[in-house]
Amino acid sequence: MIFIDNEGNTNPKYNLALEEYALRNFGSDNDYLLFYINEPSIIIGRNQNTLEEVNQKYVTEKNIHVVRRISGGGAVYHDLGNLNFSFISNHDIKSINNFGKFTAPVIKVLNSMGVKAELKGRNDILVDERKISGNAQFSTGKRIVSHGTLLFNTNLGEVANALNVKMSKIESKGLKSVRSRVANISEFLDSPMGISEFRNTLLKGLYAEGEPFEEYRLSENEKRGVKELQKSKYESWDWNYGRSPKFNIKRSKRFPIGEIDLRINVENGYIDEVKVYGDFFGKEPVEKIENLLKGIRYEKTDIENRLSDFNVTDYFGELSNNEFVELVYGEDID
């Protein structure tokens, strides 16, 4: 395992660019670990509609970064009290959505610190039924990154201020549980420590899990590559916000695999445009489904026929074609 030194950079646009650059360019002979701490920011999941996830007025007033990541899942709030970790390794079909594999060494170190952490649900680490970490993945087909947050001493009040909680989430979990289900790791420690000490303790604990880590610092050429990716992608409005056209049909539903939110523009009875948003995890880009549905009649039989040779599980996780068709053109969307 090689530990990548980000040299204390707290700009989320740089750190997400560094993560992707390492994923796509670093050698496949080694596994990598990256730690980073971000300035106040909202990190948006790959498939989410940014304009509906953030309190735009508030984040503008507070100069909070809004950045989209390459992995799926929901929006999260980062600040200087939150430590982020990324494991980068070769793609393995057994690793896809296997968050237990990547969180196990982190949980073991937390347990050794007296924090009774455990993986629960799809991708969360909980202590006493309160969430201290959310995790997500992205695969290039050759390499995979599995990354997560560790709420250590985050300003939890800002989570509610900066994020707009969707009504479907409020209905499915209850407003109270949404607001109270997160916690800081520092609450569960016997002795107080700062986030720098916590970072070092976690790193030493992960070292103990195997061979000593090699520490790696980027070359000047690699730093230029990261900066170029940061500028072209992670600083661009198109990537972080994208276009938000006025669709005339909105269909959304929360499934066990997450929420799927469809915006469908129908012109003269034909589907002119489809956008898919949500906090689900899938192996394939949803743009394929968006393009597949364009140009057909907005009729259930046409939608079923178009999807008949298509496996939506690859795009959303454990979801049947019938469930997806019902979402696009059914009546039971709750």
Image (cartoon, rainbow, N blue to C red):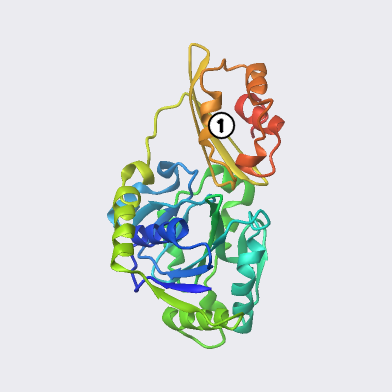
The quarter holding residue 157 reads bottom left
Query: Can I make out residue 71 in this image?
Result: yes
Residue 222 location (% of width, % of height): 33, 63
Between residue 139 and residue 261, name the one nearer to us. Answer: 139
Residue at image coords 66%, 58% = 98
- Furthest toward the bottom, the residue is 191
- 108 vs 296: above or below: below
Disc 1 on helix, strand or loop? helix
Q: With 118 as the anchor, is 243 left or right in this view?
A: left
* Residue type, mark 1 in image: Ile
Disc tally is: 1
Q: Which residue is mark 1?
A: 289
Between residue 325 and residue 101, name the one nearer to us. Answer: 101
The quarter holding residue 15 reads bottom left
- 30 vs 23: above or below: below
Neighbour tally class for label 1: few under 14, some 14-19, many 20 plus, Cα within 10 Å = some
Between residue 67 and residue 252, name the one nearer to us. Answer: 67
Q: With 132 as the anchor, is 215 left or right in this view?
A: left
Residue 188 location (% of width, % of height): 57, 79
Residue at image coords 53%, 68% = 30
Residue 113 location (% of width, % of height): 59, 84
Residue at image coords 48%, 52% = 75
* Quadrant of the frame with the C terminus: top right
- Furthest toward the top, the residue is 268
Residue 307 location (% of width, % of height): 65, 26
Query: Can I make out residue 159 in this image?
Result: no
Residue at image coords 41%, 74% = 216
